[in-house]
Amino acid sequence: MVLFGGLLSIKAIVFLTFSVFTIAAVGYLLGRVTINGVSLGTAGVFIIALLFGAFFYTSLGEQLVVKVTHESLEHALKVPYVSNALKIVENIGLILFVTSVGFIAGPSFFGDLKKNFKSYILLGLLIILVGGISCAACCLFDIKVFGRPKEEVGAMLVGLLSGSLTSTPAFSAAKATVVASERFTADQLEAIVAVGHGIAYLFGVIGVVLFVQLVPKFTGANMEDERKKLSESAPEAPSKLVGGELEFDPFGFCAFSIVALLGIIIGSFKFGNFSLTTTGGCLILSLVFGHFQKFGNVSVMPHESTLKVFRELGLMFFLIGAGVAGGASFVKYFEWVYFIYGIIMTLVPMIAGFFFARYVLKLNLLNNLGSICGGMTSTPALGTLISTAGTEKVAGAYASTYPIALVAVVIVSQLLIIFFR
């Protein structure tokens, strides 16, 4: 980490590393607290990361100030090491988690997709459409009641929508779509989008995490029966691996890394303002490799124990990176009315999607909840659902619905920005 000849101090590196593992330790302890059978699980890490960001983000930044000397000019230059470091932690976590999920879901994914393809498309579209309508309704209400400029309200509310759905692609698309007006520059509107995203992100994570735990309790679901129904609807393809297969290493790290690398490359391609992003690229590639499991006599399937460790480790890093940065902006720009808008944009599409899947599409409970996680593009909720359901197979429904929702939320966000321009 060298910049302008300045070397990030050992003290700063130690402080940053200490912070990450402190958040993880305390977060997991919080996640173990159970009330009436409901717990935060790994999302406890996110809560502690938010609190850490709210109270210690500035202190952390001051630890990463680099002394720069240029001729006669000497001054302390504040380099955004904190945000950059947190983004690295978040992205590494996302890659580990999503690639693991893809490999785990791969063997049953295509069978499940073939059987429920239309349902997943309809559900993904419905969730995002209802979210977009909720956003538009909140925009119109805010303009009428509070009289704020429509460009400001549109940028803020679309940021809230992307935060409510924890959707980085929608967030990026909204920022790329805003244009300057008579009252606001493009940079100002982009900043407003970012603020809205940060405010809504908290409930966007916690709301879906609690939803997938509470629904089975409220419906009196028998998880053993639900797992049987899921297995019947998404039978796992028989393993294609036999003795004598060539493995690159004992744990499958090499195969995992190759797939992650290819996923990052594919996710980086842009078509206008749209791209699969790292998440989409890694998910699709790992699903394909997980389905085939081998090419020729070469195994490309990491060991199950490796995937489970990477899945949990990735989710932890992702929540820490996103949570610390989100905590800082949440406190700085928090307004109750915006937070309430965010709650509406999380709950309304999620509840509508659940009842639509249950009573119209007739999906079993675990396929329903897995699809809700995918339709809400909620990575943390999937981790919680896997734990709640007691089976990795729910990842198949998530992986099937996620791409549909990903494309739809980007388009809806851009349309909303244009409408309220």
Image (tube, grey):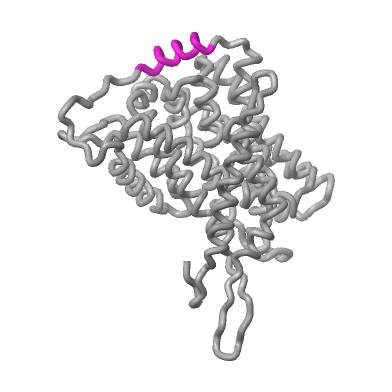
Residue 198 vertical position relative to residue 232 in the rendered view, above or below: below
The answer to whether residue 154 is visible is: no
The percent position of residue 359, horizontal first and vertical second, equals 57, 14
Looking at the rendering, which quadrant does residue 16 occupy? bottom right
Q: Would you say the magenta stretch is mainly helix, strand or loop?
A: helix
Q: Nearer the viewer, residue 418 or 271?
A: 271
The percent position of residue 34, horizontal first and vertical second, equals 66, 24
Instruction: Please indicate whether residue 198 sits to the left or right of residue 401 in the image.
Output: right
Q: Nearer the viewer, residue 89 or 345?
A: 89
Instruction: Say which residue appears at 66% left-offset and 40% top-offset.
Output: 47
Residue extending furthest toward the bottom: 72
Instruction: Say which residue appears at 35% left-offset and 37% top-offset.
Output: 286
Which quadrant would the C terminus be assigned to in this image? Answer: bottom right
Instruction: Say which residue appears at 48% left-offset and 45% top-offset.
Output: 93
The answer to whether residue 366 is visible is: yes
The percent position of residue 26, horizontal first and vertical second, equals 63, 40
Residue 9 shown in magenta: no
Instruction: Say which residue appears at 44% left-offset and 24% top-offset.
Output: 392
Instruction: Please indicate whether residue 82 sits to the left or right of residue 160 in the image.
Output: left
Specify start and end residues of the magenta stretch as a single range.
223-235
Looking at the rendering, which quadrant does residue 12 occupy? bottom right
Label total for image: 0
Instruction: Please indicate whether residue 8 sits to the left or right of residue 164 in the image.
Output: left
Residue 32 vertical position relative to residue 136 in the rendered view, above or below: above
Residue 17 vertical position relative to residue 12 in the rendered view, above or below: above
Residue 227 shown in magenta: yes
Q: Nearer the viewer, residue 3 or 110?
A: 3
Looking at the rendering, which quadrant does residue 176 occupy? bottom right
The percent position of residue 317, horizontal first and vertical second, equals 52, 44
